[in-house]
Structure formats: structure tokens, C-alpha cells
Amino acid sequence: MKPEWGKITAAQIIGPIQGKLVAGQADISLAGLSTDSRKALQGELFWALKGEKYDGHDFVEKAIQSGASGIVIRESYLPHLAKHVRPDQMEAPPVIITVKDTLEALGELAGWWRRQYDVPVAAVTGSVGKTTTKEMCASILGQVGSVLKSQGNYNNLIGVPLTLLRLAPGISRVVLEMGMNRPGEIARLTQITGPDLGVITNVGKVHLEGLGNVARVARAKCELIEESSPQADIVVNGDDQMLMEAASRLRKDLFTFGLVPGRNVFGGEIQENTPEGVSFVLHYREESRPVNLKVPGRHNVRNALAAAAAGFLMGAGPAEVVKGLEEFRGIKGRFTIEQLPCGITVIDDTYNANPDALRAALETGKSLVPKGGRLLVALGDMLELGDEAPMEHRAAGRLVAEMGAACFMALGEYAHEMINGALEGGLSEEKAVWLNDRDEMVNRLGSVAENRDLVIIKGSRMIGLEEVVRKLKESVCTG
């Protein structure tokens, strides 16, 4: 029988995670699984995980008070727990299960859970575009059945298992996003998910802090190929030479997408580009279909081609692929375009940043500037670039100058590198400014931006530039 929350018992969970029942009734059914003690946990299993900032074990008592029917903790924590929790004195004592490592055990449970369902699973990774590709793919597969997909940034060793543990009867396909910042993570995620199809969108200058160089990024992404079943389909960007070289060493039967005829799925006749979107012709086998994406940019054509390739291989037909792509409406914080009442266009691209994504954003943004308007650029740091961070931020500044920005402002640890790069590229000191904080960025943008101007705001998520977008929209058109 397929596992299902509300029916599954503690006894059924203990085996897959090699756990030990130290208290409670093994036959108790569990309503769900949570790692967050702040939520109501009535009847659920609280899984104590240790993160960089918090340790879930510190909140076990709170979870029990919130109604958790069971807890999973690491073995070494049991003596400490015994000082504070006395099951023998409780009217309805919780199930207490111990494991050697709660993160490892979470992955084991998710892998076991996934194997109980005969449902195709697609796993999407890549340096740039994986979230958009995942969402496009889910939109396509939603045309042919019920889809379970990764929510938000649930793409790591916690988020992917938690997504798989939502697999339930009635779901016909699963689309997962897999991220990483060091070697071995994609391998482990692939072992857990057992994908029937893997997609690698591209490789680029991301996570260099943990990987060193782009060649190692390519090898890390290709762990998806190494750990997938030989029967799994592997979709790769045929236009990405470094990716193709790395992938071809591992598999010869690759399914490719790209903008070059000869790929298994390719896009041509691209009609760029308006704030409302971009159109192209999708070619697959003997089929050629026009596609009108509701998101702009050549980079989104590539994302659409990756999603289309996955869709075809997972049972969608041409009409369903096109409909799914055209129903996709973008993701908040990922090149989200908003036209303000006073005629200013704001592009919110604050979800994340790396050199390749920045180039795509600036090139697309430049093409969208209204006639008679100007390009204004506000950037924050790009994180996890390791030793290449100074060089890449200086290059970012030069790129802003190359795009002809009328005003450039930068914020963060490497702001001075970006500004120096812009000055090297020909921007004047009046146009290139190093700022101290987000409020200063809001105020400066508000004083500079005029009717018909287009403002791009982009930075890594930890920089928090979404706050700049919010405050700018609240203030810029009120004067």
C-alpha cells in the first residue's frame, strides 16, 4: 500500500530510516511531517534538523506542546531530552524515534516514499534558469495530469525530501528543482529522488566559493547524470559547450535543446522583445509550433526549450507543450516587470544574481527601454563567487557601462569594484555612484527616475533588494 499521511504509522517509518523507537506507541498514525515548531503540529511528526543558524532539537519541547504526535531526533540528543520530557507523565505521550543523523534520515525516508509510487519524476538543475524551467515544465505537465512540484526555493537536501514527502495518490508526475553549492549535493539529491528524467539547463559562474571554477561546476551538475539510472532520459543544453563536453563523457544518448538546428528540440524565428513577452517557433521532430511566451528575453526562450524537451519526454504532446508554456506568467523577483502610473518601468530581478544571469537581465532590459527613455541600473553584490568575486564585480560594472546606462548605483561589499568597472567602461562619476544602504538606493532612484525610464534592480537574495523595489513602488509616483 502506498504511504499516505493520515494513514502511515510510526512503525512504517522506523524501518526506512533505521530508527529506534524509544517511547510511544508504534501503531499511532501520523497526520504529516514538519520541521517548523512554530506551526500547529496537531498529530504530526516533528523532525528536528540542525541548520546553520538554528537547531531543531532546541524546539522539541515546543513541538510537543504544539500537538506533535511524534518526534525524530538524533541519538546523541536523547540524554538531554530525557531531562526535560517525561513521556511516562503524559496523558498522550508522543512517539520518540532516534536516528544517527536526522538530515540523512530525512533523505532516506523521502527516497523510500518516492519508490512506493510508480510516478515519473523529473529533476531540474543548472547554474541559471532552473527555477523558471521547473515552473514551465510543471505548467506543461499540468496539461496532462496532476503535478507535484518544488515550491519556492525547496531545492536542497531539506527542501527536496520535504517535497517528495508530499507525494500522494492522484499525483501523476513530479517536477523537482535541485540546487547545490558544493560537490556531492546533486549526487545525494539524485540518489534520493531517483529521477526518470534529468535536465541540466547550463553551467556558469555560480557557487565558485565552494567549487573553485566553472569546470568543477559542470562536473558537479553532471552528478545528476552519474547517479541517474541508465534508463533515465537526460536533457542538456546543446548550445553550452562546457556542459556538453562534461556530459558526453558520462552519457552518449543525450537529449539536447538549444537555438541551433540539429538539437532534438530547438527554437528559431525569435521575435524580440516587448515587456509582454517574446515569441519563437518551437521545432521538435516534424512539428513546428509558434509559441508566445508571456515573459520577455532570449534567456527565457532557452528555459522554454528545456521545459519543452522534458515535457515531450514525459508524455506531453505538442499542443500541450505550447499551451503550458503560454500559460506560464513568470516568478516574482525573477525579471518581474511592473509599469508604474507615472510612466516608469521597474524590473524586479532581486531573487538572485550571478554573472550570466546579470548579462541576460541587462541585455533584455536594454531591449525593453521605451523610445525616449533611459536605462537605470541598481545592483547589489553577487554572492558565492569566491576568489573571482572582485574580478566579476568589476566586469559587471563594465557591462553596465557597455549597455549605455544613464545612471548606475551599486550597494554591498563589492560595490566599489562595480563602480570602478563602470568608470573604466566610460561612465562618468556623476552617473556611477556607490551607495551605503537600501534606503539611499530608494531615495536616489526616486530622485533620478523619470517618465519612460526603465529601472533594473538586481542582486543576490541575501542583499535584500526586494525591499528597494517595494519602497520605490510606494514612493516614486506619489509626488
Image (cartoon, grey):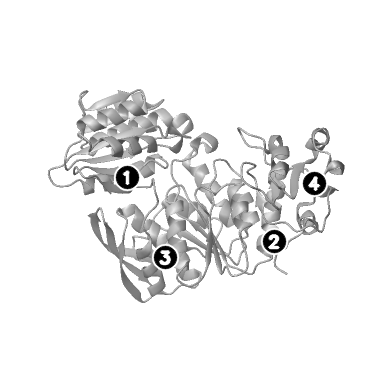
Under mark 3, the amino acid is Ala
Please, is residue 341 above or below residue 445 in the view?
below
Under mark 4, the amino acid is Ile
Left or right of residue 212, residue 451 in this image: left
Please, is residue 14 above or below residue 344 in the view?
below
Residue identifier under label 1: 361
Q: Residues within 10 Å of mark 1 (few under 14, many from 20)?
A: many
Residue sitting farthest toward the right: 88
Residue identifier under label 4: 96
1 vs 4, front mark: 4
Under mark 1, the amino acid is Ala
Q: Quadrant of the C terminus?
A: top left
Contact, CB < 8 Å: mark 1 with mark 4? Answer: no
Left or right of residue 267, residue 158 in this image: right
- Mark with earlier residue (1, 4): 4
Between the C-alphas of marks 1 and 4, the distance is 50 Å
Between the C-alphas of marks 2 and 4, the distance is 18 Å
- Mark with earlier residue (2, 1): 2
Between the C-alphas of marks 2 and 3, the distance is 36 Å
Q: Which mark is residue 6?
A: 2
Between the C-alphas of marks 2 and 1, the distance is 45 Å
Between the C-alphas of marks 3 and 1, the distance is 22 Å
The spot of residue 465 in percent (x, y) is 38, 35
Residue identifier under label 3: 308
- Mark with earlier residue (4, 3): 4
Contact, CB < 8 Å: mark 2 with mark 3? Answer: no
Under mark 2, the amino acid is Gly
